Amino acid sequence: KKLGLRRLLKNEGYESHWSCSTAKSGYAGTAIFIRTHEKVDVKEKDGMGSLDSFLGIKSKNDEGSESSYSLVPLKNEQFISTEEVQIGLGKSKHDKEGRAITIHFPAFSLTALYVPNSGQKLERLDYRTKEWDVDLLTYMQEIESRRGVPVIWLGDLNVAHKRLDVYNDGAKHLLKQAGCTLAEKESFSRQLEAGYVDAFRALHPNAEGQYTYW
């Protein structure tokens, strides 16, 4: 399935990178798709599948006939060219779950994350806040220091840092719910205090109902 999707994404002009859990099949994983080419509509010449056809969508050109595309490099291809790909945080205790991919671009480094959930009974809370979060911050700081460019991390961060990040602020169960505990909020605050910015909250300080929990 992954290989088939990788081929289809390539046909659509995307570079793809994957990290899958080796600890448990289907348990967790991350992926990054980078658009490197744009599609130029041309008459369909062969039966090569596209992402649209994979999803059951038939593309039409202006005359109403089915069409396919040729791929042309984006004008900013040099800016988004992949210089290096790193899988994981460089620690086996974390990396077996496939929760991180970093792409180093010329002007910045970007890390896609699926941060561990602390569990329904908060059984992974200490691991999440005292190990994963600490090692993640160290990892990002090391990249920034080594490359001398800005770093960005995003994805499912599994934390509701502020009251506006949940729809039911004040509910009694929240402080005992994974992602909403005081320990997780404080851990995320320490990451920001190290010199980083919650980009969404900085741009939209009063926004609510935007599912920023995730």
Image: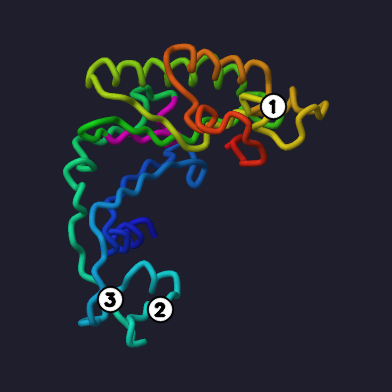
Residue 106 picture location, percent across and down: 20, 33
In space, the residues marked 1 and 3 are separated at their CA atoms by: 47 Å
Check disc 2 and give the amino acid type: Lys
Which residue matches tag 2?
58
Residue placed at 25% from the left, 33% from the top?
104
Which residue matches tag 1?
163
Residue placed at 26% from the left, 65% from the top?
39
Residue 13 picture location, percent across and down: 26, 59
In space, the residues marked 2 and 3 are separated at their CA atoms by: 10 Å
User: Which one is earlier in the sequence, the residue at label 2 or at label 1?
Assistant: 2
Residue placed at 68% from the left, 21% from the top?
181
Q: Residue furthest right?
A: 172
* Side (left or right) of 206 relative to 111: right
Asked which quadrant contains residue 120, the reply is top right
User: Which one is earlier in the sequence, the residue at label 1 or at label 3?
Assistant: 3
**161 is higher (above) or lower (below) than 4:** above
In space, the residues marked 2 and 1 are separated at their CA atoms by: 44 Å
Asked if residue 65 is among those painted magenta in the image, a careful observer would answer no
Look at the numbered discs 2 and 3 and tell me whether their residues touch, using CB distance below 8 Å. no
Q: For the C terminus, which image quadrant?
A: top right
Bin the neighbour count of mark 3 within 10 Å (Cα to Cα): few under 14, some 14-19, many 20 and up.
Answer: many
Which residue matches tag 3?
68
* Side (left or right) of 92 relative to 144: right
- Magenta region: 94-103
User: Which one is earlier in the sequence, the residue at label 2 or at label 3?
Assistant: 2
Residue 36 picture location, percent across and down: 24, 52
Q: Nearer the viewer, mark 2 or mark 1?
A: 1
Bin the neighbour count of mark 1 within 10 Å (Cα to Cα): few under 14, some 14-19, many 20 and up.
Answer: few
* Side (left or right) of 176 relative to 196: right
Q: Nearer the viewer, residue 77 or 120?
A: 77
Asked which quadrant contains residue 168, the reply is top right
